[in-house]
Image (tube, helix red, strand yellow):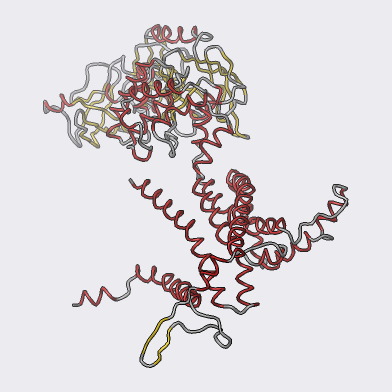
Amino acid sequence: MNVQIQERSAPAAGRQGKGFVQVIDVVKKFGDAVALNHVSLTIEKNELFALLGSSGCGKSTLLRILAGFETATEGKILIDGEDLARVPPYHRPVNMMFQSYALFPHMTVERNVGFGLRQEGVPKNEIAERVNEALDLVQMRRFAQRKPHQLSGGQQQRVALARSLVKRPKLLLLDEPMSALDKKIRQQTQFELMNILNKVGVTCVMVTHDQEEAMTMADRLAVMSEGEVVQIGGPTEVYEYPNSRFSAEFIGSTNLFDGVVVEDEPDHVYVEAPGLPARLYINHGITGPLGMNVSVSVRPERVLLSRAKPQQPYNWVQGAVKDVAYMGSYALYRVELGNGRMVTANVAGLVLSQGEAPSYGDEVFVSWSESSGVVLTK
Amino acid sequence: MKTLILRWLPNGRRTVIGIPFTFLLLFFLVPFILVVTISFSQQQLGVPPYTPLTTLKDDVYSIALNIGHYKFLLQDDLYFATYISSLQIALVSTLLCLLIGFPIAYYIARASESVRGTLMMMVMLPFWTSFLIRVYAWIGILKNDGFLNQFLMWLGLISAPLRIYHTNWGVYIGMVYSYLPFMIMPLYAHLVKMDLTLLEAAYDLGSKPWRAFIEVTLPLSKNGIIAGSLLVFIPAVGEYVIPELLGGSDTLMIGRVMWDEFFNNVDWPMASAVTCAMVLLLLVPMALFQHYQTKVLEESKR
């Protein structure tokens, strides 16, 4: 497993220097406050790249630097090899779909979408053609004569998308694209948006605080915290192999066991965690000395609950069921360990339906397989 | 029965609307009706200096409406010229206020939040002094040996004093000075609530700052421009103090004519007719504004 991880990160490092969008060692300071601390990213052509983090992590600042609304204190931004440091926003081959959509309230849908083309002095008949094309793409042509306030939130979003695509930008920026929509239509809209972006074939940077949104839409994502990039990778990679406690806890939920490394071989690690009856066995190696303090992350869906003591000599602990939340397709169990700690486990609906599942107050054994844990050194 | 009584008892809603309504009824509508009645009467010596409209003589109750004053208004070129001149002076003053007031309002609206209040305070500060005194002060500045001319001559820009006092220039300066805050306030209110991401969106779509101003900021402050212009234009048409103090004898404004008819000629009916005609004249722009406002309201509700 260790080898695989290295294989994954190796090409990413090799890509440096040939990416379509390159963010190189960017620092942004507002007075004394550091919003971005030496951020470097490489985004490939036609990739949908998500910047994921909670508010104040610097993701929006980075997006605004890409758009040209803010200038980086240090570092460089290259798009298609062109340094954009001194290029004002109105000369950048970059368009943005704003969080609030920022549709011009005094213009019709048609004029909103055509605004960017009119600024460039595109001939009138070509504007009409391209506006219609863009409106067709988002299926809003029949609303062309409406004003923005006469449209629903979802319709406004489509118009905003059409407006930001009509100039065929080299880079499209999406600022929290779903945040203004109802939860119900969000998922459907996510897929629609991805379809449109795939159809057009545009390089995209999206900012979001919603990890589900980032996981659904992005090809790759960067987890950000306090102005720094914590991890970059595909959604699966970041979820299955978080590189730090922050990543593990921010993307999905997880159980973290703190302990020290007692045995480190290329193909496995033993971790001794105080308060756990058995050692933790993980079938991948780490780089670090023996006795190092680490955390082991185990996702709730990887955790097994059983009444009988598991066969394996490692990765188990005893506890009592404290909470059961039925979620439909699965049930969420919270098991209290002897030392008062809680472990979360998702039990699949199938298991529940077989009537074998433990219930509130039951003494259970919590266990997981050797491939379910991830050792986090940061 | 009980509900009927309850219905006629004043409730909160009615009281709230009723107080300003009653105030306007008593202090605006009733006096205005009096002015309208006087305009249809005839001048006479005595107290009051006009004849009653109604007479009861030999059991005959008759109402006599004298339309002579209105006829005179239409026939006499002087009145016509005065109305045109009033409208023109008010219009030019409004445009000057807009040209000067817009940049000021824009600057204040874009200033940092902490200084906005102070800047708006400075705009309104002149109101703390009497309007009359402020216009009087302008005489000291504008007259031939006033501060302005002395200063310009000291600079060597002019050799002989400029004649501003007692000309229409003096009136324009006084008008712009006095009514500028009324232009700035509604403009500021519109500009300050404008969503600045709209400007960012315009820049993002390739709009240079000045084009973004013309295509986004200006249309979005249209209502502020209309409100400010009416707030300046309407009182400027009937302005009396400024043309009287700063204007020349050839400055024709309806306020002065009214004053002359009323106090010099003691011709109350004529003064009333002049007033009514002016109100009619001002009702047109006000009705247009009202019509426009309701249209905007309806549009945003749809």
Q: How many labels does the image show?
A: 0
Residue A376 horizontal side relative to residue A358, left or right: right
| Residue farthest along the front direction in this orientation | B75
Relative image position of residue B200 (x, y in whole percent): 52, 33
Relative image position of residue B93 (x, y in whole percent): 63, 54
Q: Can residue A294 be seen in this view?
A: no
Q: Is residue A25 visible?
A: yes
Relative image position of residue A272 (x, y in whole percent): 38, 21
Residue B43 horizontal side relative to residue A218, left or right: right
Closer to the camera in the image, A187 or B166 = B166
Above or below: residue A45 compared with residue A214: above
Relative image position of residue A267 (x, y in whole percent): 37, 7
Residue at 43%, 35% in the rendered image: A103
Snapshot quadrant of residue B255: bottom right
Snapshot quadrant of residue B46: bottom right
Residue B139 horizontal side relative to residue A300, left or right: right
Quadrant the N terminus of chain A occupies: top left
Residue at 69%, 67% in the rendered image: B244
Closer to the camera in the image, A165 or B55 = B55
Residue at 56%, 87% in the rendered image: B47
Residue at 22%, 20% in the rendered image: A310
Closer to the camera in the image, A291 or B211 = B211
Residue B119 horizontal side relative to residue B296, left or right: right
| Residue farthest along the bottom direction in this orientation | B58
Closer to the camera in the image, A252 or A181 = A181
